[in-house]
Image (cartoon, helix red, strand yellow):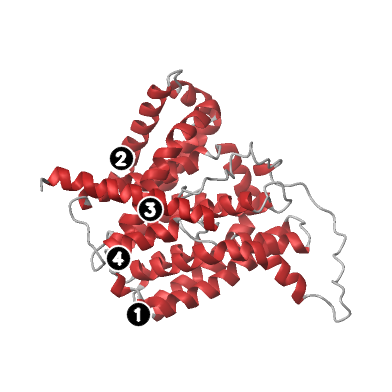
């Protein structure tokens, strides 16, 4: 069979399978990410029926998937919202980092994987899945809840932290010296600062330069600009993902909305390809040895995320029930964990199987903790006489500017996705 013909057949089969798996996940009420990973495991090296003809195209598609994931994430936030969140939510972000990154780093060191792998695994356990969480909030009808802006604030801090974390990780994985790593970090911080400044002061001019009445022209310009900036960022060892995220931040208003609607289907397609590719590159036989560490990490970091959400909601003046709901909602991990693990497998191949098992567990239990953490906490704190302790009548401060009014159809940060969406 001709190579092109075989590639087309394999690609068609992969995309069709992804569509069917997405529909199945939607009916069950879960994110399709674990099904995409399982499909990759089934048809990758060591799987049931390894795919070969489409491997190169799938690898390129996976790179594009990561770039589009970060671009669409950046389009959801404006520079002013990021700055406001950084000012109001940084204590919660610091607690989030300590509680959730430390278990991953400690696990890597205990397993003897070394300090670089510890930095990578810290990121895997630290970052929540904004995609899964957005869908869960929509499915549970919590978009207008008082604790929802708090959840969004924590997610924004994590997303912004990625602009610093990914360049550091990239430099460490490349074996760059301390001086070289410092230069890379300074370049990254300078780039982020410059983009935020330009977006704050001249965002309208940037958006006007990109804007077009033609949907075709807008799509081509935004996509071309994103790929170009991502490539240049990677050349500077800043990370292509960060470059794409910054392009999204720089665009605002109608341009951001139009680009988001045009690029969302492409994002969903290539993001699904990315998850499949990650599964393809992981040998299923490597997962059983790391299943116990993955399960222990899942239990520990589920509890630490609940504690993170509880603390963040308490700072915002949310009462007990809302605190537990916020904590349970933040548990899910997903796209970022896989992105980080994908970067690190070249240095420590065992991170791939561990991250795959970990994300499979966390994506499944994330919707469950979002739904049941608050009822279980209420039952656990119920007094012997059958009453629940009264909540303190503390004053409730105003919510951060990130989501002063969170409406299901209007919120730029929580977009309930269809069943086939791989991310937020």
Query: What residue lies at 57% left-to-right and 54% top-to-bottom?
Result: 133
- Regarding mark 1 in the picture, which secondary structure is present there? helix
> Going from the N terminus, do you reach mark 1 or mark 2 first?
2
In the image, 19 versus 234, the foreground residue is 19
Residue marked by disc 3: 167
Query: What residue lies at 44% left-to-right and 51% top-to-bottom?
Result: 22
> Going from the N terminus, do you reach mark 4 or mark 3 first?
3
The label on residue 282 is 4
Query: What residue lies at 48% left-to-right and 49% top-to-bottom?
Result: 423
The label on residue 232 is 2
In the image, 179 versus 50, the foreground residue is 50
Q: CA distance from mark 3 to mark 1?
A: 30 Å
Query: Does 200 appear above or below 323?
Result: above
- Regarding mark 3 in the picture, which secondary structure is present there? helix
- Regarding mark 2 in the picture, which secondary structure is present there? helix
Q: Position of residue 264 (x, y in %)?
A: 45, 38
Q: CA distance from mark 2 to mark 4?
A: 29 Å
Query: What residue lies at 43% left-to-right and 41% top-to-bottom?
Result: 71
- Circles 4 and 1 in contact, beta carbons < 8 Å: no
Residue marked by disc 1: 289
> Going from the N terminus, do you reach mark 3 or mark 1 first?
3
């Amino acid at each position: 069979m001709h190579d092109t013909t075989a590639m087309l057949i394999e690609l068609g089969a992969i995309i069709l399978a992804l569509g069917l798996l997405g529909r199945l996940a939607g009916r069950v009420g879960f994110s399709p990410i674990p099904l995409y990973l399982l499909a990759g495991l089934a048809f990758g090296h060591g799987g049931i029926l390894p795919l070969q003809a489409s491997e190169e195209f799938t690898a390129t598609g996976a790179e594009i998937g990561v770039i589009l994931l970060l671009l669409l994430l950046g389009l959801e936030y404006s520079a002013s919202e990021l700055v406001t969140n950084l000012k109001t939510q940084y204590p919660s972000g610091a607690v989030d980092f300590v509680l959730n990154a430390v278990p991953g780093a400690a696990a890597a060191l205990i397993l003897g994987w070394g300090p670089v792998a510890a930095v990578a695994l810290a990121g895997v356990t630290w970052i929540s899945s904004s995609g899964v969480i957005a869908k869960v909030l929509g499915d549970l009808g919590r978009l207008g809840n008082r604790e929802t802006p708090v959840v969004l604030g924590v997610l924004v801090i994590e997303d912004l932290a990625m602009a610093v974390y990914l360049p550091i990780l990239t430099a460490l994985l490349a074996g760059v010296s301390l001086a070289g790593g410092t230069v890379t970090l300074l370049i990254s911080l300078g780039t982020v600062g410059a983009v935020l400044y330009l977006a704050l002061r001249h965002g309208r001019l940037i958006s006007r330069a990109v804007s077009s009445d033609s949907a075709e022209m807008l799509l081509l310009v935004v996509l071309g600009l994103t790929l170009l900036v991502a490539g240049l960022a990677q050349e500077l060892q800043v990370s292509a993902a960060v470059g794409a995220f910054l392009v999204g931040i720089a665009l605002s208003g109608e341009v951001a909305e139009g680009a988001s609607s045009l690029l969302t289907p492409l994002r969903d397609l290539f993001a699904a390809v990315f998850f499949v590719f990650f599964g393809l590159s992981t040998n299923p036989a490597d997962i059983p040895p790391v299943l116990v560490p993955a399960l222990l990490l899942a239990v520990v970091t589920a509890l630490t995320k609940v504690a993170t959400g509880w603390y963040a909601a308490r700072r915002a003046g949310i009462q007990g029930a809302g605190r537990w709901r916020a904590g349970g909602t933040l548990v899910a991990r997903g796209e970022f964990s896989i992105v980080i693990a994908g970067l690190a497998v070249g240095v420590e191949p065992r991170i791939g199987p561990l991250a795959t098992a970990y994300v499979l567990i966390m994506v499944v239990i994330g919707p469950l903790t979002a739904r049941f953490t608050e009822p279980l906490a209420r039952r656990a704190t119920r007094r012997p006489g059958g009453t629940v302790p009264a909540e303190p009548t503390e004053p409730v401060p105003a919510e951060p500017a990130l989501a002063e009014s969170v409406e299901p159809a209007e919120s730029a940060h929580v977009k309930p996705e269809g069943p086939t969406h791989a991310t937020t």
